[in-house]
Image (cartoon, helix red, strand yellow):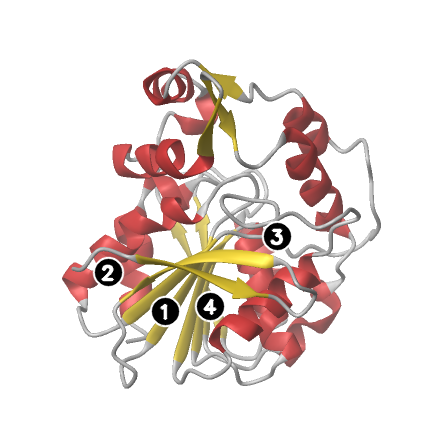
């Protein structure tokens, strides 16, 4: 597997979107990977590595969502539909395309398919944040409140790794994924390593999670779709999964044992296995 090439996309509104590209063979399937809120494109790398071992004949893109990683930040309020539009611009000239996304990234892939029907030959949506009403922007929701309190600077990358390793939300992560976040999610500012996705940007992104109304349009997604959830998820339990996939004509779901909402980082090999079935 070759090292990724760093590239940028100029979005329709002039924003610089950073992405990494593996492989440049035009006639191979394109896999596009989209991370969750607060993280960065580098947490996709373990899945891409595992997928390459299973099915080496593909090329991959992983990008930083707006206000995350090395991408520029728009002025608030944020809209998840803008991320969906960025995906369309990134992959619209490729065929076939398989989308693989986590949480907000999974929702953005669904929105990209709604914006450009038939864009994807398959979707792997891991714990997609696509929920029924009530819709709206809720500034004081628990996720935004937690983001505003996050520790956002460390003396070294090693200090960040050690700090996160002992936090419950990170405890089950594969080491490759955690180092991906450490190396891709922090930048050196003076003598400290600071989160590239600021606390304010993360909180603003969470505020946009309940206003996009994609739930009402799921029946329009006719491409083959696999929805994946963690067994210990607090948001995507089996009754909800059945309702979610029941709204899409060609969707099914699988629950991954001994994993949480962070299954993307906890079990990258499992995500890779599901993505491999679309190649």
Pick the quarter of the image with the N terminus: bottom left
Which dot marks residue 31? 1
Element class at badge 2 = helix
State which tag comes first along the sequence, 3 or 4.
Answer: 3
The image quadrant of residue 111 is bottom right
Disc 3 target residue: 129
The Cα atoms of the two marked residues, 2 and 3, are separated by: 24 Å
**Rendered location of residue 190, percent (x, y):** 49, 19
Q: Position of residue 157 (x, y in %)?
A: 36, 22
Badge 2 or badge 4: first in the primary sequence: 2
Q: Secondary structure at mark 1?
A: strand
Instruction: Determine which residue is flagged by label 4.
Output: 252
Give the residue drawn at x 57%, y 57%.
16
User: Between tags 2 and 3, which lies in front?
Assistant: 2
Asked whether disc 3 touches disc 1, contact meaning CB atoms under 8 Å apart, the reply is no
For the point 41% across and 77% down, the residue is 97
């Amino acid at each position: 597997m070759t090292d990724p090439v760093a590239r940028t996309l100029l979005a329709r509104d002039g924003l610089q979107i950073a992405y990494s590209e593996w492989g440049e063979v035009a006639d191979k399937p394109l896999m596009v990977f989209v991370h969750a809120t607060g993280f960065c494109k580098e947490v996709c790398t373990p899945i891409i590595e595992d997928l390459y071992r299973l099915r080496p004949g593909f090329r991959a893109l992983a990008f930083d969502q707006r206000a995350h990683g090395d991408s520029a930040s728009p002025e608030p309020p944020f809209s998840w539909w803008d991320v969906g539009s960025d995906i369309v611009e990134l992959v619209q000239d490729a065929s076939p395309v398989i989308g693989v996304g986590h949480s907000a990234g999974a929702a953005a892939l669904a929105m990209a398919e709604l914006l450009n029907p038939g864009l994807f030959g398959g979707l792997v949506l891991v714990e997609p944040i696509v929920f029924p009403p009530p819709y709206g922007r809720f500034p004081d929701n628990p996720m935004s409140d937690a983001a505003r309190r996050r520790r956002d600077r460390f003396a070294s990358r090693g200090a960040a790794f050690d700090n996160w390793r002992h936090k419950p939300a990170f405890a089950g992560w594969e080491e490759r994924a955690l180092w991906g976040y450490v190396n891709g999610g922090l930048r050196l500012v003076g003598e400290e390593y600071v989160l590239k996705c600021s606390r304010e940007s993360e909180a603003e992104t969470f505020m946009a999670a309940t206003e996009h109304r994609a739930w009402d349009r799921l029946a329009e997604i006719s491409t083959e779709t696999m929805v994946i959830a963690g067994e210990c998820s607090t948001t995507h339990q089996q009754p909800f999964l059945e309702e979610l996939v029941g709204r899409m004509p060609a969707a099914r779901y699988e629950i991954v044992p001994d994993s949480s909402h962070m299954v993307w980082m906890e079990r990258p090999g499992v995500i890779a296995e599901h993505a491999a079935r679309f190649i």
